[in-house]
Image (spheres, coloured by chain):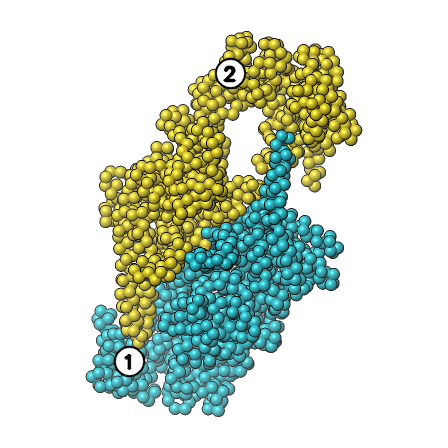
Chain colours: A yellow, B cyan
Amino acid sequence: MAREATDGAARPLSTTSVATPTKWVYLFEEGSASMRTLLGGKGAGCAEMTRAGLPVPPGFTITTEACNTFYSQGKAFPPGMWEQALEALKTLEQKTGKRFGDATNPLLVSVRSGAAFSMPGMMDTVLNLGLNDDSVLGLARLTQNERFAQDAYRRFVQMYGRIVLGIDSRQFDEALDAIKKSHGAQLDTDLDTDALKEVVAAFKQVVERETNGKPFPDPIGQLSQAIMAVFSSWMGDRAVVYRNANKIPHDLGTAVNVQTMVFGNMGGGDSGTGVAFTRNPSTGVREVYGDFLLNAQGEDVVAGIRTPMPISQLNSVLPDVYRRFTEIADRLERTYRDVQDLEFTVERGQLYMLQTRTAQRTAAAAVKIAVDMVREGVITQEEALQRVQPDHIVQLLLPQFDPTAKLQAVRDGRLLVTGISASPGAAYGKAILDAGRADELGSSGEKVILVRPETSPDDVHGMIPAQGVLTARGGKTSHAAVVARGMGKPAVVGAEGLLVDPERRTIRVGDRLVREGDWISIDGATGEVFLGEIPSIPPKIEEQGDLVELLGWADQIKRLQVWANADYPRDAERARAFGAQGIGLCRTEHMFMEQERLPIVQQMILAAPDAARTDREVARLRAEVEDAPSGRRSEIERRLKQAEIQRDQAQAPFVDALTQLLPIQRGDFKGILRAMDGLPVVIRLLDPPLHEFLPDHEGLLLQVAELRRNGDPASELADKETMLQAVEGLRERNPMLGLRGCRLGLCFPGINEMQVRAIFEAAAELKKEGLNPKPEVMIPLVGHINELTRVRSQLEETAQKVMQEQGVRIEYKFGTMIEVPRAALTAAEIAQAAQFFSFGTNDLTQMTFAYSRDDAEGKFLTRYLDDKILAENPFQTIDVGGVGKLIRMAVEDGRRARPDLEVGVCGEHGGDPASIEFFNEVGLDYVSCSPFRVPVARLAAARAAATSKAYSTK
Amino acid sequence: MAREATDGAARPLSTTSVATPTKWVYLFEEGSASMRTLLGGKGAGCAEMTRAGLPVPPGFTITTEACNTFYSQGKAFPPGMWEQALEALKTLEQKTGKRFGDATNPLLVSVRSGAAFSMPGMMDTVLNLGLNDDSVLGLARLTQNERFAQDAYRRFVQMYGRIVLGIDSRQFDEALDAIKKSHGAQLDTDLDTDALKEVVAAFKQVVERETNGKPFPDPIGQLSQAIMAVFSSWMGDRAVVYRNANKIPHDLGTAVNVQTMVFGNMGGGDSGTGVAFTRNPSTGVREVYGDFLLNAQGEDVVAGIRTPMPISQLNSVLPDVYRRFTEIADRLERTYRDVQDLEFTVERGQLYMLQTRTAQRTAAAAVKIAVDMVREGVITQEEALQRVQPDHIVQLLLPQFDPTAKLQAVRDGRLLVTGISASPGAAYGKAILDAGRADELGSSGEKVILVRPETSPDDVHGMIPAQGVLTARGGKTSHAAVVARGMGKPAVVGAEGLLVDPERRTIRVGDRLVREGDWISIDGATGEVFLGEIPSIPPKIEEQGDLVELLGWADQIKRLQVWANADYPRDAERARAFGAQGIGLCRTEHMFMEQERLPIVQQMILAAPDAARTDREVARLRAEVEDAPSGRRSEIERRLKQAEIQRDQAQAPFVDALTQLLPIQRGDFKGILRAMDGLPVVIRLLDPPLHEFLPDHEGLLLQVAELRRNGDPASELADKETMLQAVEGLRERNPMLGLRGCRLGLCFPGINEMQVRAIFEAAAELKKEGLNPKPEVMIPLVGHINELTRVRSQLEETAQKVMQEQGVRIEYKFGTMIEVPRAALTAAEIAQAAQFFSFGTNDLTQMTFAYSRDDAEGKFLTRYLDDKILAENPFQTIDVGGVGKLIRMAVEDGRRARPDLEVGVCGEHGGDPASIEFFNEVGLDYVSCSPFRVPVARLAAARAAATSKAYSTK
């Protein structure tokens, strides 16, 4: 059925071709820039230049449609195509006065593939097609260099044999080696003209042998086979794999460009070849920029064998050519409304344009060019935003190594290892192997790199003052990676081969030893780790006026708000300076981790289980008393009294810890609410499993074993044993799926209450100062409406109480993270108790895929990406098909239940441009990302709004 | 809006009541059994008996509608209700010739609540309402016992005060104590008539005091307040909580029954009271069964103060009454078409029926009664299936402790601790603290109970020959619980307070010490653990002919097939005998765990990472060679050759292990396929994280530390270090979300290939024997279609190869577990490569809720259930709102993509009746559960089919 339908759909085309034969071949003068789909990028470029009257060597393009028909008709040229090609070839002969295969004035052509998008795996250029034993004489005459002509001939046969006929290069190499040996030649250049003629003959034999006796084809045969080869390369393995990976459809087809050869290597001072840009692709400055090489063919410039002159020097060498070229460059830029990358050849004083295409550019150039072109009136602001890639912004805002110094380091053999690039930016400092020392040294102003086997929340206090982080284990979403990205701090993680030994204070890489305190440098963008210090160049954000202007335009176009994830006032300030419109995630656990607070937090944790257990026992007995028959009542009352005493004893250290933490947390929240005065700040209640705040289990186990063995008389053993017992009590097989998030609040209600009290007291104090704090309390890891209802009603009570005590009204919200699949699935229910949803896409991705982000990258995710099982890392770019389906469902169901529901995302994906496009499409209100990604997200949000008409503002 | 609508909806009723006043009160003779909703269970029962002409003391029922109107009108009697009640009371007076409150021939009544379903928290019976200082004299005259009358009077005042007026019982107790003291009485029975009169007066004073000076009401006031109290109890805290928890709507309301008192304690030999069943509720035998007590009131029988006579003896004492009663019993059973639980009173030779209701019964009785009644033509087969609860089947198939011996053990103080009931059944044996010894002793025929802190797959070989399993940690879905249930073996887990010390070989409970080898007994149904041996009674399945017949009917009605989860041939045989129609889950990891295989499996695991890594390196270099420019080729070829050597070295131990495992696995599969000849067997490829097959990390760590310290010279340290390194290499923070399932197959393809080869070779051999094996290969933990496509295409190749080698065709399928949320979300894609889906609801629940089943129960799930945050344990009963939504979605999307997709469930839920109802509704093809639950599932599937009309077969 499907097959028939396709055939049926194809029929009208052939029917038309009976009436008006299909046009498969376009002379350059028949095409234009707008015909890119039909003629491919190269063909359309040459056509446009020809149409504009520019000097382009005559040529023609066989359409992408011809390629598609070639495949649909069992790999045969479409009827009439070859005749049209021969017709076009005749036109080239007429235009140039040369003849294909002629011995006196031969027409030589290049044949190139040219799809709408440039693509690896496609057939490359075949030059000098049309050479045979006759026309090689003509080439010798034209270049007045017989050796050159024979050299070109043997190169052509080999190139043709390899590219068009698919013959293994080694066959030619062996034949060449034999001849070199027989002539006693060391190098190719030792061969004279006659020897080269021998090579040509030998190469032709190779072709005949490898093609089962078919002699090397004549020029017409060359052309037909070359076209066939280009078509065939479209379905070559690598091209297909590439298109699959990049989701490019397979039915675009490739065009074939056949173009008259011109020679920049005709000898004399008036031939040459060049490549140039209409503006400086490195700085964006408006100047023609490039290289020119006298007496050379196109490849010579690129190959870099001879040193070319800057294009500006052409003005003194060939002033007419230079003037004509700059005029053309200017004209092409205006036609294409973008910077062009041009190839040209000068043949005996005559300028020929060979290619024009949109130029690649650096981040700085991209921004400058886009903004300049708006100022020049060439493009609109919206177009300017499409010209700058989000990655450009990332680059502009990061410190980078001085390229020369880095190159030198590589040459000096100081590259130690390459790990996973986890958080971009360059950093150097002393390698320090524990968080405590890193904190100490870093805080005293020393530059340190924290190096750990892997990090845990225990290490955060050492990461804060460090220049960068290096770990031996973990992937792009490991703790180290996530925290470092959040801090905008360079990080290399999962550097396998790195043996970090915190006890011996050494790092081993193979047989190299780095001692603690040695200087190292890390490049978080490439994953490279160097021995020694490589100076880095800091970013100059304030100075980047063009960028600031561009982002201003982005803000006008984007629909999504951009918020930031920030745990500290200084991060919030930075985020606001970068344009953040709120804080989408303030994690309170990092506050708990700071060194001086940790002992209080640990006291709280050690006391919590007993406090909760005894509290419940009291409640249970109270209920029992009420229900009890009169006979048993007094006995139960006695037990109740006992239980109350035990409860009070158990509560004491717990309450004491909370009492100490309250003013500290209040201070934290006051700082961040002050920094974001007037803007919303989403504060997440304590979320991680409590064991993260306690010492490592294994370490304790070994210590206790050691102390027991040594018969430690002091209280150290008892303390460690108590701690070990607590750690074991909190241990879980899968902490990610364990006692954390709102489950903590439901098991140990006191902690949440303290936090909410701190938030509202902080807000109240600011309110009294005349500020306008807007706290939004986020309850994490909700999976069932009942969890949210219980926690929220308890906390609303605390909030009301504080506002009453303080005598102020605060604008606030209560909401939840949607990070458990069940929350997304039951969003309609959950929205009834939530004023906002914030998608925690990290965890949602973990649960939806059943991937632990701490384990997956090292264990199998990298492999999945290598093997293309997954096209993208779902922790970086949102998985639209699975996780995205849950998000879409939750947004729709949630809004239906509560039309004014505020919906955002606070996972890592909030700063990822591809994900932002999706978030824009599903109608989120905001994305929240790390402060350093705010500018990126602003641009990405604007680009998404512009492409998605459904949501574009105007 | 909603409120208005409700009011509006209520209006027609009141409008009608103007035309024909609403009837709020029904005399018993005006009702019938079918009016249960309006009259409640008790009211409808009395009405039915009255209608049938049976001797019921006259009475009337105030409707549930009156109760609802009472609430909708601000807690006031509906207009006209009280008048109708008084009217009905007058009718009672006329019928009985007695008068309410009369001093000579007083009418006394009982007042009881009676909702459609019996419900705790509702108001209990008030007897003898209508007593006052006048009527008490009448009562004394009627009973010819003044003391009795006064005692009844003081009891009535107290009961009325407590139940109707809500006065604290202690108030009355204190007053009574004071009078007892003043009379020098020790016991209540020491008080004479006058003292009792004092008590009445004192009690009346208590009432007056506690009700702010209102005197004790007169009979009419008593009646009106009692009715009000019944209505109010409907919205009492406990009743509301109960209805919420059981999802009973709050607008059912309760009825109020007012009935003439009759007196079985009128003295003489012709009064008495009894309770009886129309059949034996314990055995199901068709005989009137119950107790009768001469000269007693209703409560006396239940209270058990005096020993009643068996009902059959009544035949000799009061033969007329007996004959009359058995006739009535028979008639009522026929009317209700089910066994009735009857209450009756004989007042001076006159039989009065007080209550009839459907009788509770034991499991054995339920089956026998249901089957007998079908044989008697009383009920249909379909009805019979509704009369037997799935839990009844569970009970019938389990060994249970001899009740007398168990009671004695409790009395002897041998109950050690009560843990979580994880797998029902009773077992006793020697407590053994490690799997090795349990295996050894158990295999040699000794009865052992394996006692562990918790279990891991390492312990499975010790569980197999054990009678039962006891762990100190873990919840209902812990490893021990799941495996034990799978084996149908009794287990108690999470017995907190149990300190298991495998090193010292002791178990401590508080100050009690159990040494390894001591006898213990566990009851997996109750969680009880006893010291010593309690004999258990084994189940007699074969002998249960009635059950077999009943399940045969179930099979005819059910739509769902019932398959079983079985890892071993013996389990499969058992399952088939229980009626399993296939194996839905054969876990291959348990096969890997058996002691003699474990070393081979460990060799495979230790070798796998290097084998895979070197293999990939070879593949990478091969690709590089192909793409390499000729100049670099030889260098890369050299590296390739080296890599190939390394690969071969690394592969050797890996391939060797697989080669050893192949024949073993082939034998495993042959056994299970043979047992299930002709039926499908779903075999899951290796699934668990590999570290589960290696020694415990902590143990190793401590051992290595110890060996290092002792400067161990032998190779033991080196071996342990190698093992430790391997264990650390495979360690994961969240193994549940890590390298397991199909990820193993994608990282270490050799394992899957070996397994599939073993499956197909086994099937081929059986085929040649003339059997019909139907293997279905299940690829676990798929989350993305690409995973399935890759694994399946590789394995299809192996399957084809084996079939070619063996020269046979095998009927087989490839499919996947749906256990990762993403798989359910993308079921339409996944169905393209899967011939079957099997919902792994254990893992799907874990991921959807983000609950680790290993951690949740101990940490917070029990609490969630206690606090009613979750109504049910989602690991026991499927969460319809969340997990169920995914399942429904996946079934629909999967079937749309592949209409003949086979869909089943193999999680724990497959054996849960409530879940089976859901699986039936969403249209699964089968449920698969542990062999012992197959009969339960057959019944549940039939009940589900019968209730769900959409899917009922006829």
Tell me which corner region of the image, top left, top right, bottom left or bottom right, holds residue A651: bottom left
Depth check, front residue: B769 or A755: B769
Tell me which corner region of the image, top left, top right, bottom left or bottom right, holds residue B228: bottom left
Depth check, front residue: A892 or A768: A768
Provide residue A839's location: percent of width, then percent of height: 43, 44
Near mark 1 (Cα within 10 A), the count class, few <14, some 14-19 or many ≥20, is: many
Q: Residue furthest left?
A: B182
The image's mark for residue A310 is 2
Marks 1 and 2 sit apart, C-alpha to C-alpha, by 119 Å
Tell me how many marks there are: 2
- Tell me the residue at 48%/63% (across/down): B455
Say above or below: B282 vs B421.
below
- Tell me the residue at 55%/68% (across/down): B464
Left or right, A861 with reference to A539: right
Q: Is disc 1 placed on a helix, strand or loop?
A: helix
Provide residue B589's location: percent of width, then percent of height: 57, 59
Q: Is disc 2 placed on a helix, strand or loop?
A: strand
- Tell me the residue at 37%/45% (across/down): A434
Chain letter for mark 2: A
Disc 1: which residue: B154
Chain letter for mark 1: B
What is the three-letter code of the residue carrying label 2? Answer: Pro
Say above or below: A245 vs B29.
above
State yes or no: discs 1 and 2 in contact (Cβ < 8 Å): no
Tell me which corner region of the image, top left, top right, bottom left or bottom right, holds residue A161: top right
Say above or below: A870 vs B587.
above
Provide residue B769's location: percent of width, then percent of height: 73, 63
